[in-house]
Amino acid sequence: MTSVMRPLPWHWAEFERLLPAPSRELAHALLLRGPRGVGKLDFARALAAALLCETPARDRTACGLCQSCNWLRAGSHPDYRELQPVRAGESGLEANDERRASSSITIDPIRALADFVNISSHRGGAKVILIHPGEALNPNAANALLKSLEEPPAGTHFVLATHRPHQLLPTIRSRCLQIGLPAPTHACASAWLEAEGVSEPQLALAHSGGAPLLARELAGGAYWARRSAFLRILTLSELDIVSAGEALRDFSIAEVLGWLQKWSYDLARLQAHGSVRYNPDYRSELDRASARADRLAVLRFTRETVRLQAIAQHPLNARLFIEDLLLAYQDVFRSEARS
Ligand SMILES: [Zn+2]
């Protein structure tokens, strides 16, 4: 649990609307919907903190000072459970981590919830279960959760957050009160990033598709250096696949795929609308590449990178995968590849 006891500023209106008069009047299951990286988890944690707090502030947010708030901060609140898949780092952005990560929430922690739900709360107040992201529940886990969702005891709250509500079981969706959490406006997001000390807020925001939390993650670590190294290779006038594969062999597949996807999306967008979205700092390189690339082949390649996202989560031969990707990318410049 982070020390965040309040939602991000652009979600305050949604938060206020939900803040319970007494907590028992709040729906026992909430589904927070919204794009990745806009602050759903912060919202969910702030809501959990408010529900559990023993001396809420006048605006009904958690006080941050009571025993309950202290336990939450320490990650040891007896009336709180937080279920997430084991992610690669916090961000999923660190290189070479994806092999240790699991992308799903399995049935065991969900089964364990049944006991938690049925015993009375330690502090005599609310109990909160946060599940993030909901689409990470594997089918068995989702079915097991349904039972707990059906009729939890009074004062027990489930808060699910999801980037992909359509991937949840319809029966789970229908048991939840759905709350849409939008991305902030561009101006609001860049002001926030600046206040967070992000050095190039505009670029980071463009690169993360307007999601401020993703943009902030990018600011840390060596992300930009890795991206430059990759784009330097990609934009070489003579791209040699074997030496590129060698140079990139320790890179994260998911990261390389993500860069290629953004790059080819920008190529397609340049060809269709004359503008770029993700890589404004490489505009002249993109201009040159788009002038040479075949439109249809670019679209096909972009779709292929989206399709490959599913595979990139699983262990495989990273170097071969990256070489294949680069070979496919080269084809967008070959008119003879048109069919
Ligand atoms: Zn408190």
Image (cartoon, rainbow, N blue to C red):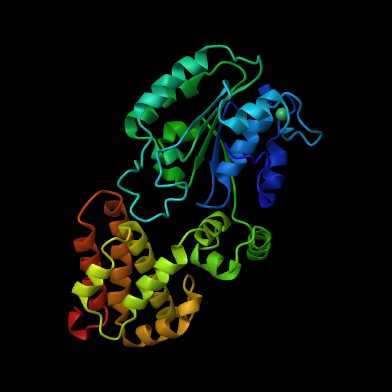
Where in the image, quadrant-wise, is ligand 1 located?
top right
Q: Is residue 194 above or below residue 105?
A: below
Q: Residue 28, located in which quarter of the rendered image?
A: top right
- Where's residue 276, x and y in %? 48, 76
What residue lies at 25% left-to-right and 73% top-to-bottom? 244
Q: Residue at x 51, y 13 (%)?
A: 118
Circle count = 0
Q: Is residue 86 left or right of residue 247?
A: right
**Image quadrant containing the N terminus:** top right
In percent of width and height, residue 203 lies at 54, 70
Examine the rendered structure and indicate whether residue 230 appears above or below residue 3: below
Q: Position of residue 25 (x, y in %)?
A: 68, 24
Image coordinates for residue 257, horizontal then vertical, percent: 33, 62
Q: Quadrant of residue 55?
A: top right
Q: Is residue 6 visible?
A: yes
Q: Quadrant of residue 189?
A: bottom right
The residue nearer to you, when weighing 58 against 165, is 58
Q: Residue at the spot x=68%, y=31% of the render? A: 50
| Image vertical order of residue 217 relative to residue 22, above or below | below
Q: Quick one: which residue is furthest to the top in this view?
A: 119
Quadrant housing the C terminus: bottom left
289 versus 79 height, above or below: below
Q: Is residue 26 visible?
A: no
Q: Is residue 60 left or right of residue 14?
A: right
Instruction: State the residue in front, 280 or 274.
Output: 280
* Residue at 41% across, 40% down: 135
